[in-house]
Structure formats: C-alpha cells, structure tokens
Image (cartoon, grey):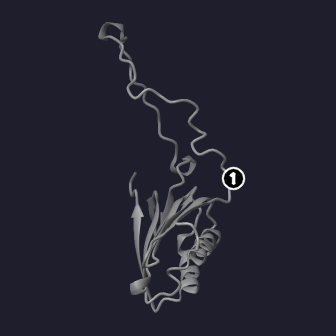
Amino acid sequence: MRQAALLRSDKGLGTPGTDRKKAKPAVAPVKSVSALAPVKAKRTASPPIDDRKDHFVVRNGVRCAGVHLIVDLYEAKHLDNIDLIDEALRKCVAAAGATLLHIHLHHFEPNGGVSGVAVLAESHISIHTWPEVNYAAIDIFMCGNAKPDACIPVLREAFEPASVEVGENLRGRGA
C-alpha cells in the first residue's frame, strides 16, 4: 500500500520557500509623526491591457483572472487508485499546456477516497473522491494561456464516468 500522503514534483524546486531569504518583521517600525515628510501622490497611467503581465484571459469576450471549471463525475471508476489519479492529473496538466509545480495526494482509510491538488504556475487542479458512491468533485482553475477545457476528455478517459457535469466561473471579472 502507498504511503498516506504523497508529495510528487516534476520541477525539482529544491527547498520549499526559497524565495523567502530572511524573515520579515511582523510589524514594520513606525516613524514618529514629526519625522514624516508630506508626500505628493504621483499618478501613473495603467499600462494598456495588452501590455499587462497579469496573465488575465479573455473568455467569451470577458476579461478575467482565469477560468474556474467545477467538474462532477458520477458513476465513475478507479476513484481509490491513487496512482491512476496522479497520472490523470499529470495528463490534465499536459493537455491544458499548464506548468506543474507539484502534486500532493492523500489516500483516506477505510473507504479509499483520495483528496489532492496539482499546484500549477497557472493555478491548480484539485480532486476529492468518494469511491463508496462512485463520485468525484474536481476543480480546475487556470489563467494565462492554459486551456482548462482540455482536461475534461482526460478525466472522462481516466475515470469512465456515466455522466459529467461542468460548471464555469470566470474569476476576477473587472479586476
């Protein structure tokens, strides 16, 4: 049997949190009021939308932070197979053209359900399975050039559900 919690990575990220060179104080020191000089606010123009580096997307004519698919699989198979779930998540990432940072899966006992997440540079794919009722709940949230819809055929092939329901939410509209 596999260990209960798994951390799997394709990126060789080294030590987690390496971007944090040294701890920052919880509260910044406050200067006395008399030491503060008046500051004139400078107005800077926002860059044109096309030049922004925020990885926002346009979907159905709507500019948003990303596309969040809520996927329900009914009468699905293999929902207690942690290796197949890992493989399915990796295939979803590849199909979507996303960048995998790491995968963490947890196998529950005694029912064999699995909960986990594939953390992506573009956001995440999470999965929660209930093999005792043949149901899986999956969230796919992606920004940038990733194609979250490409995950649906991968999930159909891996879990062979009798039915699939997909809801869509465009996150961060107008941000």
User: Is the residue 70 above or below the residue 153 in the image?
Assistant: above
Q: Which is nearer the eye, 57 or 71?
A: 71
Q: Amino acid at mark 1?
A: Gly
Give the class, few, some or many, for how many residues have Cα within 10 Å of label 1's Cα (few <14, many ≥20).
few
User: Is the residue 80 above or below the residue 66 in the image?
Assistant: below
Rendered residue at 69%/52% (across/down): 12
How far across and down, in percent of the image, does residue 64 sit?
A: 44, 59
Q: Secondary structure at mark 1?
A: loop
Rendered residue at 63%/44% (across/down): 15
Write down the residue under mark 1.
12
Rendered residue at 52%/66% (across/down): 4
How far across and down, in percent of the image, does residue 162 sit?
A: 46, 92
In the picture, which quadrant includes the N terminus? bottom right
- Residue 30: quadrant of the picture: top left
How far across and down, in percent of the image, does residue 105 sit?
A: 53, 66
How far across and down, in percent of the image, does residue 48 sit?
A: 52, 46
- Residue 6: quadrant of the picture: bottom right
Q: Which is nearer the eye, 132 or 139?
A: 132
